[in-house]
Image (tube, coloured by chain):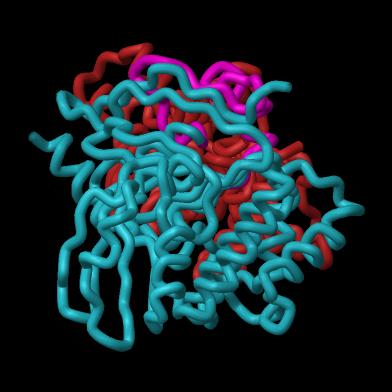
Chain colours: A red, B cyan
């Protein structure tokens, strides 16, 4: 599997620069702060919860807001992580190495994508560890936590796919970051308009990233939501592959 | 035997601009082909076409019998390429980088170490193998680039301006390496330095404005470069009349009393006769040598002819 060799190289080189380390450090700090705020919240409402029938559990109060906020923070950071993945190689002329090696465009794109995804998975598992630590003292709904972790992994996977596509398309890394950030933000807020008009538009609702993400966060794994994310990732990777092939023909 | 490269009426356009115009040539094992041209003549574009980095607008290119466009993976399997800027990951050490290149070129994991080791040896990189590529000098980086192109022992090696930015000793070393590689592989190298071609190539192609204007092997090239002139220097003044008895000589230009230029008929080299005559006459000869057109002269002539 050539894609795996590229992915491994990509993952390793991310850690050779300070980028990945600083990103991991800063993110973990921010997530820890968010996590502690949620715990504080829980402590505040805990006495009242005792009197409510079917009260939300510890997991319900802490996990979905934490993962939801993590999604928004990663929406900001993912474009920066993915912006240079193809674009920078083309600018420093190292891309010729991959193009002249016996690799298909699919190997290159999938390899690069997997490399970035591995790092994102390290980040998401870092987040998941924090609520898991509550299991030491309290009871935590592991199923729901797993669902949230899956939702966040799929979400950042989708972010990365858009990022890789923009990096294949754009001539400059900053442009790639701007492109992918604007596109992701648009998909994030696309269902706001339906709320204003007070008439639900099925298609726009379906396109919204946040809707599918929140569906999964509730702990309900619906195949439509899984399908949405997988299709989303696959189509952007396919677009990147086509884009790379096309550039070889035209340029 | 299949040819390593067969290029057949290849054209490449960038918009309306034609960068490569009707290029056809072939290359077999054991040949070192020098691609000459001024800046912007289409050398790099041709190299990129051969390596499948660009697709030809029309025509086709076969490498080892496989079409670069329709069977890219099989074609690139037997290809090593050094672009004009060496494609180096500056954050890696030399041996890490070569190991990655070896893996990309389908070398089994067990043989990677041996492949890296032999490439390091061939390009004399052993001393710097644990250094970061970003810390190496330009000459060493160029050598890492070459090592990267030969690590998988490809049948065909394409080097785009391999000696740019190197000092004379390094250039000499690279020529030796290219000659050595040329014995068992097919090599194409592009350059705008003519001496490089004279030194290490068995075949020469000159490209200008995207068109091939000369395709010769080294023997044919030597014939073209011959001017049918001899340079004769003597210690004492010499009367040109003493040589007129020789029928092969067409005429003699006197440059100074001790320096003559002798023009002769094509295919009749009068050098042995002249030597005999002069020795018999007791003249002290300081120099008697054929005058050759320099590559530079030939190159400029050809380009001027084609620009008209």
Q: Which image quarter: residue A132?
A: bottom right
Image side of residue B89 versus residue B271, left or right: right
Camera-nearest residue between B113 and B67? B67
Q: Residue at x 46, y 57 (%)?
A: B198
Given the current orientation, which residue lies at the most extreme bottom position? B235
Q: Position of residue A34 (x, y in %)?
A: 52, 65
Image side of residue B289 versus residue A2, left or right: left
Q: Is residue A142 above or below residue B245?
A: above
> Start and end of the magenta stretch?
B51-80
Q: Is residue A54 above or below residue A66?
A: above
Camera-nearest residue between B51 and B38? B38
Camera-nearest residue between B127 and A203? B127
Magenta region includes residue B58: yes
Q: How many marks?
A: 0
Q: Is residue A10 above or below residue A1?
A: below
Magenta region includes residue B117: no
Q: Could you tell me which quadrant the N terminus of chain B lies in?
A: top right
Q: Position of residue B155 (x, y in %)?
A: 69, 40
Image side of residue B24 versus residue A199, left or right: right
Q: Is residue A72 above or below residue A248?
A: below
Q: Which image quarter: residue B229?
A: bottom left
Q: Position of residue B296 (x, y in %)?
A: 27, 58
Q: Position of residue B146 (x, y in %)?
A: 59, 60
Q: Residue at x 57, y 46 (%)?
A: B32
């Amino acid at each position: 599997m050539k894609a795996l060799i590229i992915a491994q190289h990509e993952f390793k080189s991310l850690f050779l620069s300070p980028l990945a380390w600083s990103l991991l450090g800063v993110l973990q700090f921010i997530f820890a702060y968010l996590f502690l705020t949620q715990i504080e919240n829980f402590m505040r409402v805990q006495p009242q919860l005792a009197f409510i029938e079917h009260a939300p559990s510890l997991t319900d109060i802490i996990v979905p807001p934490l993962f939801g906020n993590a999604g928004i923070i990663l929406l900001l950071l993912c474009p920066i992580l993915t912006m240079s993945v193809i674009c920078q190689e083309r600018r420093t002329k190292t891309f010729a190495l991959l193009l002249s090696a016996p690799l298909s465009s699919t190997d290159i794109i999938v390899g690069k994508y997997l490399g970035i995804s591995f790092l994102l998975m390290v980040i998401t598992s870092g987040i998941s560890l924090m609520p898991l630590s509550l299991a030491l003292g309290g009871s935590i709904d592991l199923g729901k936590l797993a669902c949230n972790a899956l939702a966040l992994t799929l979400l950042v996977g989708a972010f990365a796919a858009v990022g890789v596509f923009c990096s294949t398309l754009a001539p400059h890394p900053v442009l790639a970051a701007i492109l992918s950030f604007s596109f992701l933000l648009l998909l994030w807020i696309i269902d706001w308009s339906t709320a204003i008009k007070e008439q639900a538009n099925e298609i726009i609702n379906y396109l919204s990233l946040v809707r599918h993400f929140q569906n999964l966060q509730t702990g309900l794994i619906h195949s439509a939501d899984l399908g949405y994310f997988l299709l989303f990732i696959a189509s952007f990777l396919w677009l990147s592959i086509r884009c790379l092939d096309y550039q070889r023909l035209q340029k | 035997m299949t040819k390593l490269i067969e290029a057949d009426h290849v054209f490449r356009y960038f918009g309306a601009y034609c960068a490569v115009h009707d290029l056809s040539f072939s290359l077999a094992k054991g040949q070192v082909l020098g691609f000459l041209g001024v800046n912007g003549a289409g050398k790099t574009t041709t190299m990129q076409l051969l390596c499948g980095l660009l697709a030809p607008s029309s025509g086709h290119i076969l490498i080892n019998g496989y079409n670069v466009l329709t069977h890219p993976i099989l074609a690139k399997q037997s290809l090593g390429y050094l672009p004009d800027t060496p494609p180096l990951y500056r954050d890696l050490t030399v041996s890490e980088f070569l190991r990655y290149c070896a893996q990309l070129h389908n070398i089994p994991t067990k043989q990677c170490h041996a492949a890296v080791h032999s490439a390091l040896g061939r390009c004399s990189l052993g001393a710097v193998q644990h250094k970061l590529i970003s810390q190496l000098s330009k000459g060493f980086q160029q050598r890492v680039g070459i090592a990267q192109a030969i690590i998988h022992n490809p049948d065909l090696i394409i080097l785009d301006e391999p000696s740019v930015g190197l000092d004379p000793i390094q250039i000499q070393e690279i020529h030796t390496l290219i000659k050595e590689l040329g014995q068992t592989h097919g090599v194409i190298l592009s350059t705008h330095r003519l001496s490089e071609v004279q030194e290490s190539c068995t075949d020469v192609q000159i490209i200008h404005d995207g068109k091939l204007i000369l395709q010769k092997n080294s023997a044919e090239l030597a014939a073209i470069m011959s001017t049918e002139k001899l340079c004769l220097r003597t210690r004492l003044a010499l009367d040109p009349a003493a040589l007129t008895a020789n029928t092969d000589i067409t005429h003699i230009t006197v440059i100074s009393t001790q320096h003559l230029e002798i023009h002769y008929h094509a295919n009749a080299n009068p050098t042995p006769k002249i030597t005999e005559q002069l020795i018999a006459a007791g003249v002290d000869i300081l120099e008697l040598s054929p005058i050759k057109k320099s590559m530079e002269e030939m190159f400029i002539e050809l380009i001027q002819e084609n620009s008209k």
